[in-house]
Amino acid sequence: MMKSWIEIPEKSDFPLENLPFGIAEIVTGKVNAVSRIGDYAVDLEKLEWLHVFDDLDFDYEGVFSKDTLNEFIEMGREAHLAIRHRIQEVFGEGFFKDNDDDLLTAIRATALHHISGIRMLMPVKVTDYTDFYSSIEHATNVGKMFRDPANALLPNWRHLPVGYHGRASSIVVSGTDIHRPKGQTLPAGADKPVFGPSAMVDFELEVAFVVSKTTELGTSIPAADAEEGIFGFLLFNDLSARDIQSWEYVPLGPFLSKNFGSVVSPWIVTLEALEPFRVQGPVQDPEVLPYLKTSGLRNFNIQLDVLIKPQQGTENLVCRSNFRHMYWNICQQLAHHTINGCNITTGDLYASGTISGPEPGSYGSMLELTWRGANPIHLSDGTERKFLNDNDTVIIRGYAENEHLRVGFGECVTTILPVRS
Ligand code: MN
């Protein structure tokens, strides 16, 4: 692990090797771009004002003073890497020889903010949002429950990364609470629908990526080049109302069951930070078509935990999964998404779909964990859950770890509020 002159607590998600990007409200009404080291947000606007980035080959003037990262993301990979390397240099142990160094004094006075004293905001203006369905375990579980246990996967599933176009307007940052949605559902055995609060509000454990590329309509991104246009990853909770979903989704797919609120973690962790944690994905059988072929290590070993905390209770670990289980990788997702000429925009968000692993404790939704309510989860306060109750808080944590290094996302948190009257 790289050493910094800032104290980094043991097991921190944010060593100098991470350096994620986010947007923070530093004091009331003052918003700008930040990175993070240990428990401190590093104010990128102030570093720019202190001329820390002056001799780099890019003009960053003004980009860290915006209320989203879109303009910085648009600058491209080389510009992001230059900032990353300069921060690693300046915050590295031994950079300042003299404790009275003017720059060190100025950084300490103006550019470091303890994380407890600031508020993290939505890091990016999401221009478009697509949700994939790329976990074979999840797709198989859902297929068994809703269709045919013997033929759980539909015939197309192993040939293309299935996805749907979601809605960007209702994607919010961690810490934003979401009201239980109302809608139409078809009660079991009934021949006509009823209207009311959803009784089956669920989380979906996902990881999303943000792109740093804008392309023209009619062009495609080859799988081999896809990572060049990917800025970084976020934890993603795609809240879902299962009772609304099962009535509405035929024949065009999810609609109001999925757009009442989806929650992202505030820090975008870059591909560079996750470089040491690349792993081989599952074997794809049958062989995929040529435009979907990838080589090298395209999956990432990221441990993912989901916890439920009732209003008066403590945290309960209900799921432990891993991003490495994804059958379709991010290069294949982006290649497939653009193979018909669909254009993409800097700031687009592409979510993985629910990430389930092979064991029951690794299923990434209540739908699967409780098998549609048949096997309720028992919480430490003595209550049980088939789906989420009002005032339950859902916490997703994600981190990659080896014997030398831990790089994490922090948390993605949301509380389910009662239906809005
Ligand atoms: Mn989803």
Image (cartoon, rainbow, N blue to C red):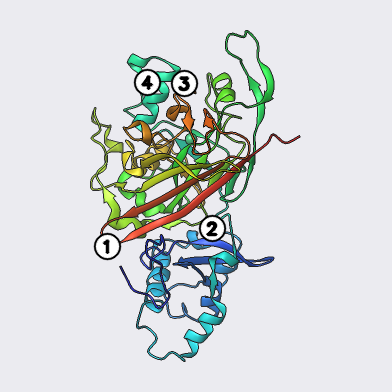
Q: Residue at x 43, y 89 (%)?
A: 99
**Residue 227 position within the rendered picture, expressed as x and y whole percent measured from the top left:** 35, 51
The mark closer to the camera, 1 or 4, is 1
- Disc 4 residue crowd, few under 14, some 14–19, many 20+, Cα 10 Å: few
Q: Nearer the viewer, mark 2 or mark 3?
A: 3
Q: Mark 3: give few (<14), some (14-19) or many (20+) Cα within 10 Å.
A: few
Disc 2 to disc 1, C-alpha distance:
32 Å
Query: What residue did someone put label 2 on?
Result: 70
- The structure residue drawn at horizontal position 58% and vertical position 54%, both measured from the top left corner, is 122
Residue named by callout 3: 374
Look at the image and tell me in which quarter the N terminus lies. bottom left
Image: 360 above or below 15: above
Mark 2 residue element: helix
The amino acid type, in three-letter code, at marker 1 is His
Alpha carbon separation for disc pair 4 and 2: 37 Å
Please tell me which residue is depicted at 32% across the width and 48% down the height of the picture: 300
Any part of residue 212 in sight = no
Residue 297 pos. (x, y %):
25, 48
Circle on res. 404:
1
Q: Which amino acid type is marked by label 3?
A: Ala
